[in-house]
Image (cartoon, coloured by chain):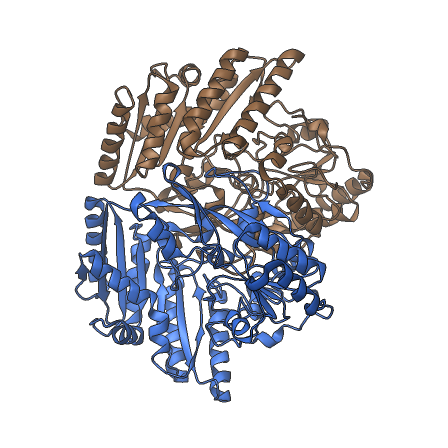
Chain colours: A blue, B brown
Amino acid sequence: MSADLVAPHAERGDFETVGAVLKQRFGERFSTAQAVREQHGHTTSWIKNQPPQGVVFVETTEDVSDVVAICADHNVPIIPYGTGTSLEGHVNAPEGGVSLDMSRMNRVLTVNAEDLDCVVEPGVTRKQLNDYLRDTGLFFPIDPGADASLGGMAATRASGTNAVRYGTMRDNIINLTAVLPDGRILKTGNRARKSSAGYDLARLLIGSEGTLGIITELTLKLQGIPQAISGGVCPFPTIEDACNAVILTIQYGIPVARIEFLDTLQVKACNAYSNLQLSEQPTLFLEFHGSDAGVAEQAEMFGEIANECNGGAFVWTAHAEERTKLWQARHDAYWASIGLRPGCEGISTDVCVPISRLAECVTETFRDIEEMGFVAPMVGHAGDGNFHVLVLVDMDDADEVARASTFVSQLNRRAIAMDGTCTGEHGIGQGKMPYLEAEIGHGVDLIRQIKAAIDPQNIMNPGKIVPHGD
Amino acid sequence: MSADLVAPHAERGDFETVGAVLKQRFGERFSTAQAVREQHGHTTSWIKNQPPQGVVFVETTEDVSDVVAICADHNVPIIPYGTGTSLEGHVNAPEGGVSLDMSRMNRVLTVNAEDLDCVVEPGVTRKQLNDYLRDTGLFFPIDPGADASLGGMAATRASGTNAVRYGTMRDNIINLTAVLPDGRILKTGNRARKSSAGYDLARLLIGSEGTLGIITELTLKLQGIPQAISGGVCPFPTIEDACNAVILTIQYGIPVARIEFLDTLQVKACNAYSNLQLSEQPTLFLEFHGSDAGVAEQAEMFGEIANECNGGAFVWTAHAEERTKLWQARHDAYWASIGLRPGCEGISTDVCVPISRLAECVTETFRDIEEMGFVAPMVGHAGDGNFHVLVLVDMDDADEVARASTFVSQLNRRAIAMDGTCTGEHGIGQGKMPYLEAEIGHGVDLIRQIKAAIDPQNIMNPGKIVPHGD
């Protein structure tokens, strides 16, 4: 459960020397100031801060290549940093090293509107891209809660509320450019929508969490903004009823764009944080995309399902502005939850199970929360079978921390036993390392083999995904 | 261009010994009969037959694991064989070794209708699976021309006519079980619809063409059979007009399920082979999936585009039977083409370019065909920017063979220069090896590193994708 599992690598090079070379090459774009270092080890969640020894603010692929080559020469780790919104300690530097701040690589390089694609630098955030695209009639659908960088979203195989319809980062990246551990620049392919040209190197990098290379360019699929969008809110008497409505919606093949679950406590938190007046009971947030007729048809079909599952009346928000407010509240759920118990840290969970097991998994988890007496709101991309419990923990109470660890461990193992995963979209990072072997068995060895082949010095974001060596 | 590029590996073990062990273990399920060997080196296309030294008809994952362990002990190659319908020499045994015939591993293990997924063995063919699913209201959309095995389709990252809407094998496989080169059995994950649990090992195996492991189970996404399906045929005066209609259809975001292009010669071939009466001019085959209203809406929108692009009248086939006949003809296009010039071999091409470059790429290629005087029908998954030219070549005419090689090389390099790929769905195999570096640069080295790390003896389908070593 803790970052301490990662033993520092024995033979790292001298950071003094690396720092001097970086200072010479990057001047004021290289910093070793304490505040800057700590900010770049900030982990959003309960995982403790392990700051890097220095930070370089890179501006080009060549900058990245230079830093990597310098660090490789001296066996010093490199940790890429986007917006620092990861929840599993991805930006931590358990073995020291250099944080690569990608935020200045924030140019949209090309929009090929006719091909429904674009090429961006990794520091572009999802909101920045969609603002940029506003006049093109196109949008990029992947939306984790935070306004994360697209490079970070690729590195963690992120998704969000639209994944049930549009897929995850895995499905929405055509190709990548990355700097490999030896400083070489790799372009995984061109802009063709599909390819069978050898190993899927783009997919290998997506979700590799900076452990194989540093992403410096992304070619992304774009979607046409639908002719019609309608959204709504539907309350249910019980968690199980809400889950069953989700399950039926998916099984009936309604092409819902978003179908999000919030438990009563989460609704309360969102009402308080985002100034909403929702009825405080288990609730689904929905959105439909399509033609005018198509959207109406989907809403009608969902209405029948909700009715069958004891759902309350829909509250539809016809106005774009109201819809935006609703979804901003959904995206701020994390911060709303943290506000429920000031001074506490949040332990985020991220299990994902086959949809047929969703109600069972949610219900058993809710029983654990009640039995263990946690303040732990629940929110989820229910259409994917993915839900988050944020356990709010007083980190000074050792007993509470231990009980929270037990809860999280139970939840992760329950999801794996239900043919699911301990992480639907947050990644392994440091926090989920203890569960990976239970989930993929020998796959852990295979990951280790690949990592060792591509990064024999283990300089790329060491101490994430799997421990190095045997 | 030729399989002779692959130099046999120097230190392969003694096949006599391996044969004896396999005979003892598998009895009559192991064969070294000449006819059986040649059938398993059959390459469908012009690439010459390089038969394996023996064939094992495996029935279980454990069988596969045993064969792999035996072959690993003696440094003897293993070549997986599904239905032998690959077009790039994937089943050839340029360094000898054992062909693993997967056709008896043809059980559908589980259908989880409520989760829209199923688990199958690799020898199940796409038609067999859809027959099996008939009463469930579900179907598996990926449909290469041949009734290929799902294991082979995964190994080559295949697609087909439905990819424009449903994606390729990459998008429709949830997870895989595979036997690794040391005989260990790897399960890449569970049945959750999405996961961020470490490297995407399933995607690494998909498209690895048997060079990293032998796929022994596949967990596949299924789709609900749409409420309404309508299909039609639309002729155009020129290739360019037809391509432009495709481009506009995609750019307008019409969620077309199939949009296939056939040039005049291909229409002639299909008329003859499949007993159709189509007007002999550049033609699009289309299919729309959705609700009754949705399908009508899509067809109307396409009608406007076709009209704008000088398209002729639609011929709609309302009856399922007629539709099936049309699509069977499309799937038989390869055999129809081969029939245009009996006694000749077909050189299949498979370029894929961004949709904005499709008309230009097709037009330049058509000019090459005319100038070089080839019999070479053209057919394509135009909605993906992917099209095939089948060059019919008299293999006894060295000059013609040389000219065909030049044509293919020019086409592949043209597609790459247009930001596309030399292979949209057939894979690299032996035939496309000379083009991979032009397309992915350093990626070739990365593939080689991964291959060497996972299969240090290079026993898994050697001589495919990239040459071994440096």
Q: Is residue B317 left or right of residue B280?
A: left
Closer to us: A32 or B449 = A32
Q: Is residue B212 left or right of residue B110?
A: right
Q: Quadrant of the C terminus of chain A?
A: bottom right
Residue A460, by quadrant, is: bottom right
Q: How many marks?
A: 0
Closer to us: B33 or A94 = A94
Q: Say which residue appears at 27% left-offset and 31% top-offset.
A: B302
**A353 shown above or below A10:** above
Measured as percent of width and height from the top left, residue A236 is found at 24, 68
Q: Is residue B441 visible?
A: yes
Residue A442, by quadrant, is: bottom right
Measured as percent of width and height from the top left, residue A205 is found at 55, 52
Closer to us: A367 or B37 = A367
**A188 shown above or below A145:** above
Q: Say which residue appears at 52% left-offset and 18% top-offset.
A: B338
**B64 shown above or below B82:** below
Q: Say which residue appears at 29% left-offset and 62% top-offset.
A: A327
Measured as percent of width and height from the top left, residue A346 is found at 43, 77
Residue A303, by quadrant, is: bottom left
Measured as percent of width and height from the top left, residue B414 is found at 53, 27
**B407 shown above or below A49:** above
Q: Is residue B217 visible?
A: no
Q: Quadrant of the N terminus of chain A?
A: bottom right
